[in-house]
Image: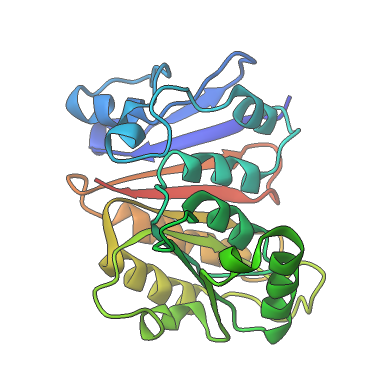
Amino acid sequence: MSALRFSSRFNPMLSNTILVQTKSLLFSFSSFSSSVRKPCKTLCCSTNSLLHTNGGTSNSSPLSEDELVGYIFGKKKATEVAHLVWRHVLHKGDIVIDATCGNGYDTVAMLKMVADESGHGRVYGIDIQTEALENTSSLLDETVTQKEKELVKLFPICHSRMDEVLPENTAVRLVAFNLGYLPGGDKGIITTSKTTLLALEASKKMLILGGLISLVVYVGHPGGREELETVEAFASGLCVDGWICCKFQMLNRPLAPVLVFIFKR
């Protein structure tokens, strides 16, 4: 079994590390809110009231054992866990940003979560590479209806400039990052610490209460570890009264992607 580290920064008393080595773990974000109110050394995982209270799409079911425990045992990808968390945050009709479209899989996942008959839901997809946007558009053609695809707006710009393409005062529920390089593309073109920090600052300003910044940080390429340190520093500097920040990281797989979630209370 792969060792997994879950670290959280709610207040100085909760900056400890938890080693998860049990096949029966069900992780729940309600532990975030209860831990803020009553500090403790161990997070007890039982329900998911925090995300549901703040407007998630589900109101009773716990976070899926299949995705989360599968991730712990090395059978699920980090991106699958990210999608799992999104489902407990997003409403139909929400506005979301895919800050790094890549090959479009995150874009499609977001669209399925926010699209409805009202047509109010929107996915703003951003990538600096034209190839990535072409791949995303092709995947949309293959997997969604034309009406659903019309809810997606794709922009060939750097994620650091996301505020330039969204209408003023847009209420964003989710900003998602899949950092690194385009899978199957030019590995020399990567996200960087500088532009990612600018993108995080922009995300912080446009995110609504109950919104989420989600990051899958790949560290196996040059600059990846530095970018993770930048993300960690950004999250660690956020006010504990307004933000809840956590990280999932494999302990014995140093090149495995790291999951970071930044939740606006």
- Say which quadrant the C terminus sits in: top left
Here the colouring is rainbow
Does residue 97 appear left or right of residue 39 in this picture?
A: right
Does residue 136 appear left or right of residue 100 in this picture?
A: right
- Say which quadrant the N terminus sits in: top right
Is 234 in front, or is 186?
186
Residue 250 position within the rendered picture, expressed as x and y whole percent measured from the top left: 63, 39
Q: Residue at x 51, y 49 (%)?
A: 113
Residue 28 position within the rendered picture, expressed as x and y whole percent measured from the top left: 43, 26
Count of numbered circles in the view: 0
Where 140 sits versus 155, above or below? above
Q: Residue at x 39, y 17 (%)?
A: 44
Question: Which image quarter: residue 141?
Answer: bottom right
Q: Residue furthest front?
A: 117
Q: Residue furthest right?
A: 184
Residue 45 position within the rendered picture, expressed as x and y whole percent measured from the top left: 43, 19
Does residue 168 appear left or right of residue 190 in this picture?
A: left
Is 82 in front, or is 136?
136
Residue 112 position within the rendered picture, expressed as x and y whole percent measured from the top left: 57, 52
Q: Residue at x 57, y 26 (%)?
A: 64
